[in-house]
Image: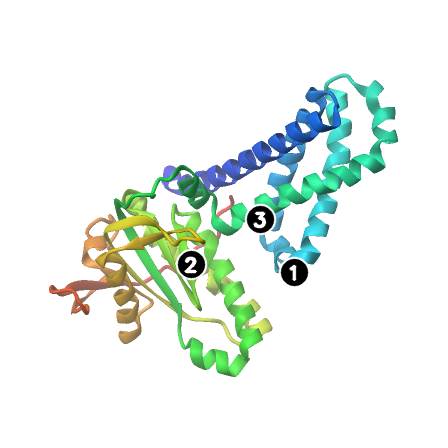
Amino acid sequence: MIRSKCFPIKQTARRKALFVLVTMVIFACLGFVTTLAAGRPLELGLSNAILIGFGVGLFEEFYVQSKRGRWLRNMHPLRSIPVYIGVIILFYIASAHLTRALLGRLDDLPTLYRRLPYGIAFFTIFSLVGVLMVRVIHFIGLENLFHLTVGTYHRPVRERKMLLFLDINGSTAMGERLGALSMRSLVSKFLSDLSAPITDHSGEIYLYKGDGLIAIWNWAAGADQDNILRSVDSMFSAIERQRASYDKLFGVAPGFRIGIHGGDVIVSEQGDTKRSIGIYGDAINIAARMEEVARTHNARCIVSKVVVEALANRDRMREIGEETVKGISTSIRVYEYQPNLELRPMSA
């Protein structure tokens, strides 16, 4: 049981630590170039840049991407970037002092103060490049950026995945009642609230689609300790805990339905001027059909037999029967899964 509770925490910590490390590398590279260009001591410039990268990584992962930092994420980029750069400049001043203290170079402080106006102006440009790179990583996703860079899926690769389709119930009527802007705000909060329950349980958000999303798991990761079902439990309990907040902000709390299927898929780069990683195959079409079955049966979550057989805990599974899928010659046996709505959030 201890391992079961700790595993998702380790996954989250690993993702955050990797992002912080990448941010440190980005700022170290920028620091190396700018230090050489400025003709300053390399040990000071590199140490300073690494400390700044460490601070920026922590700030991004534990504040900006948290609920407390939602105000900054929702701000227009032309307004949020100056705020972000201001924070980084504070890191710059603090790290400049700390670096000199650690390296025994306090005698260099008068030079630092004398050059500070020039240094801050120069560092603002440095910071802008760093912030834009961090933003690109969060926009594309660290794993996707890595795969696109090294060409993992330049040629099609067959992989075994579990796929989860999710949609808001009655979104059309809800949007008509709330209006476009309020509906957009509700969907934005909804998708944000569901992100952590997916990534905390080894999943990855493949695609946001209107008022829903598609999430994917490597087959072994989704089956291990029933991660995909634990993610479903966490998603429903997360929205349940936020019900009062939704009622206050929008006058309604969104309900949603989930369909899950899995199998072999083809993963490949797609596009030309804009590249991304696409998933193809019958499995993704059947997963979409499972979400439709959930709507038909007024169920919270529908799971196909092939996924159910890979999971250990079937206590809250109820067999529904056979369902046909357009374009698939054989019918699919499906089960209704009843989520646990009383889970408490895990600390990262």
- Determine the image quadrant of residue 233: bottom left
Furthest residue in direction front, as rendered: 273
Q: Residues within 10 Å of mark 3 (few under 14, many from 20)?
A: some
Residue labelled with disc 1: 76
Q: Please state the horizontal and vertical placement of residue 336, each as a whole percent of the image.
A: 26, 64
Q: Please state the horizontal and vertical placement of residue 182, each as a whole percent of the image.
A: 57, 74
Q: Are marks 1 and 3 in contact (CB under 8 Å)?
A: no
Furthest residue in direction left, as rendered: 330
Q: Are marks 2 and 1 in contact (CB under 8 Å)?
A: no
- Depth check, front residue: 308 or 80: 80
Q: In the image, is 172 to the left or to the right of 178?
A: left
Instruction: Name the image colouring.
Output: rainbow
Q: In the image, is 56 to the left or to the right of 252?
A: right
- Residue 270 in view, yes or no: yes
**Amino acid type, callout 2:** Met
**Amino acid type, callout 3:** Arg
**Amino acid type, callout 1:** His
Label tally: 3
Relative to 39, does residue 132 appear above or below in the rendering?
below
Which-is-in-front pick, marks 2 and 3?
Answer: 3
Considering the numbered disc 1 on the image, is that residue within a helix, a strand or a loop? loop
Relative to 66, does residue 300 appear above or below in the rendering?
below
Q: Name the residue at 47% across, 55% down.
A: 195
Which-is-in-front pick, marks 2 and 1?
Answer: 1
Residue labelled with disc 2: 235
Q: Name the residue at 26% across, 70% down.
A: 293
